[in-house]
Amino acid sequence: MNELKLGCCSTAFPAACCTLELAPEAEERFVRMARAIGNPVRFQIVKYLVTHPGCITGDIVQVLPIAQATTSQHLKVLREAGWITGTVSGTATCYCLSNENAQRFKEIVAAL
């Protein structure tokens, strides 16, 4: 059996079977995206944007139990992490899921 024992510990760990090589920038982006989506409210926003692309902040506020200012802060975090993009249209901002970044995130999770 291929096991690795640590000197002072009695726990045996299996030897590595493969690697997950990521460029430092890709790893940093993945970690930022994971942190952002780890928040339950932000996860709900992403889920909403999957089925309602191009919606504005007001639409999102109506489905969340939080204030508009708090929603805006969550949208900012998601935008900075790369989950969403926002397009200004007059006084409103239309939000969409970044399909490219979501696909990259999905591929890394699948590789894990």
Image (cartoon, rainbow, N blue to C red):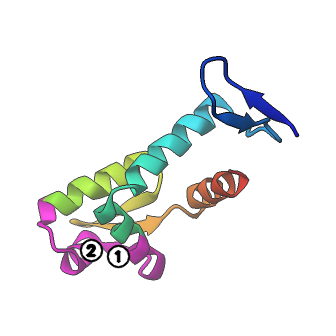
Left or right: where 95 falls relative to 67: right
Three-letter amino acid code at disc 1?
Cys
Residue 20 position in % (x across, y down): 73, 40
Which residue is rendered at x = 63% and y = 59% of the image? 106
Residue 55, numbered circle? 1
Left or right: where 18 falls relative to 55: right
82 vs 35, nearest the viewer: 35
Inspect this view and state whether residue 68 appears.
Answer: yes
48 vs 90, nearest the viewer: 48
On screen, residue 95 above or below 26 = below
51 vs 86, nearest the viewer: 51
Which residue is rendered at x = 44% and y = 59% of the image? 84
Mark 2 vs 1, N-terminal side? 1
Task: Determine the secondary structure under disc 1.
Answer: strand
The residue wearing badge 2 is 60
How packed mark 1 is, by other alpha carbons closer than 10 Å (few <14, some 14-19, many 20 or more), is some
Q: In which quarter of the image is residue 16?
A: top right
Three-letter amino acid code at disc 2?
Ile
The image quadrant where one finds the N terminus is top right
Which residue is rendered at x = 83% and y = 41% of the image? 17
Q: Quadrant of residue 64?
A: bottom left
Task: Determine the secondary structure under disc 2.
Answer: helix
Q: Do the residues labelled 2 and 1 touch (CB within 8 Å)?
A: yes
Q: Which residues are the magenta region?
A: 47-69
On screen, residue 83 above or below 2 = below
Q: Does the magenta stretch include residue 36?
A: no
Residue 81 position in % (x across, y down): 43, 47
